[in-house]
Image (spheres, grey):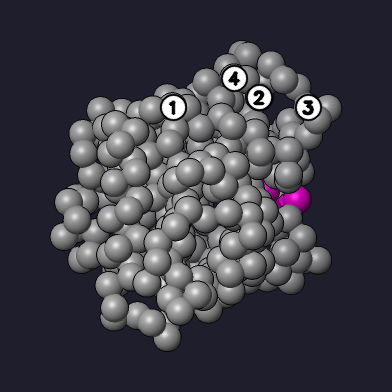
Amino acid sequence: MKLRVMTAADIPAGMRLKDLAGWNQTASDWQRFLDASPHGCFVAEVDGRVSGTVTTIVHGGRVAWIGMVLVDPDVRGRGIGTELLGRAIEHLEELRVPALKLDATPQGRPLYAKLGFVDEYEIERWVLRRDPATGGAAESGPRMIGGRGGDSQVVDQIMELDLQVFGADRSALLRSLELDAPVFALVLRRDDAVQGYALGRRGSRADHLGPWVARDEATARALGGGFLRRSTAPTIFVDCLKSNRFAVETVRSFGFEFSRPLMRMVRGTNLHPGLPELVAGILGPEFG
């Protein structure tokens, strides 16, 4: 086995592995990882073939995100995932990032615990399957702010609030999502203050709602309904904080069904936990 830095030439191999796992990422998502961290994404080669991946993104020097831990089923059980995680952790420790985070599946959680990660909070994936011609919700109100012609001042306000909510600056990542899928970039303001916002992206299997942030239930419902009306996909994913007092009830009322649990985990000193109580839906397990 050989570990090395991932490059753009490895994206087809990454797509093969994520397809084997049944995940939702696109080639554009892999490019986002490489653009954000050109020296911090790694692959494992077995007999000259890419058989495992891991990605990292550092947000503002405060928090690093680890994602896309994938191993070809044909070579599982050889410690490849552990080696990849170890290389990612080593890279982030060299950068002196105080907190490393990831979203763990029940299968991966014991491995992460052995590597020093501890539970932060629970997340649940919910899935909506519908006829897009008749699906969607009736709420109105959120304003679309996405695209190159969008209101830059409002976008800046969203990024300022997201810094507080997430706990670190991930504006470059969010702006890339907003430009790629401007139809999903929504905001609700009251008295010139942002009450909530939502972004989204198109995946290989489903449209994904997130981040979905709201100060109250009415705002969350309006943003979620606005996203559903703008999406033309028959399948939609959202990853809700289990502890959020209105997120789960809102998606259930839209017709979503529970899919699987996740656990947000952290390694190191969690100095900037953000404001998870305002998060209805995360950006995604691969991004945070």
Inter-mark Cα distance, 4 to 2: 5 Å
4 or 3: tag closer to the N-terminus: 3
Q: Can you give x and y, in whole percent of width and height, for residue 119 in the image?
A: 22, 51
Marks 2 and 4: in contact by CB < 8 Å?
A: yes
Point out the residue furthest to the right here: 149
What numbered label is drawn on residue 73? none
Tell me if I can see residue 92 in this picture.
yes
**Of residues 276 and 133, the one drawn nearer to the viewer in this rendering:** 276
- Among the two numbered marks 1 and 2 on one chain, the one whose residue lies closer to the N terminus: 1
Q: Amino acid at mark 3?
A: Gly
Rendered residue at 58%/74% (across/down):
16
Residue at the image position 50 percent from the left and 71 percent from the top: 50
Point out residue 162 in the picture as x, y percentages from the top left corner: 50, 29
Tag 2's secondary structure? helix
Q: Which residue is mark 1?
A: 60
- Can you tell which quarter of the image residue 173 is in? top right
Task: Tell me the CA gap for discs 1 and 2.
Answer: 18 Å
Element on which disc 3 rests: loop
Say few, some or many: other residues with alpha carbon within 10 Å of mark 2 (under 14 / 14 to 19 / 20 or more): many
**Label 3 with label 1: CB-CB less than 8 Å:** no
**Residue that carries the numbered disc 4 in the rendered image:** 157
Magenta region, residue range: 226-230
Using residue 92 as the reference point, say whether residue 195 is left or right of it: right
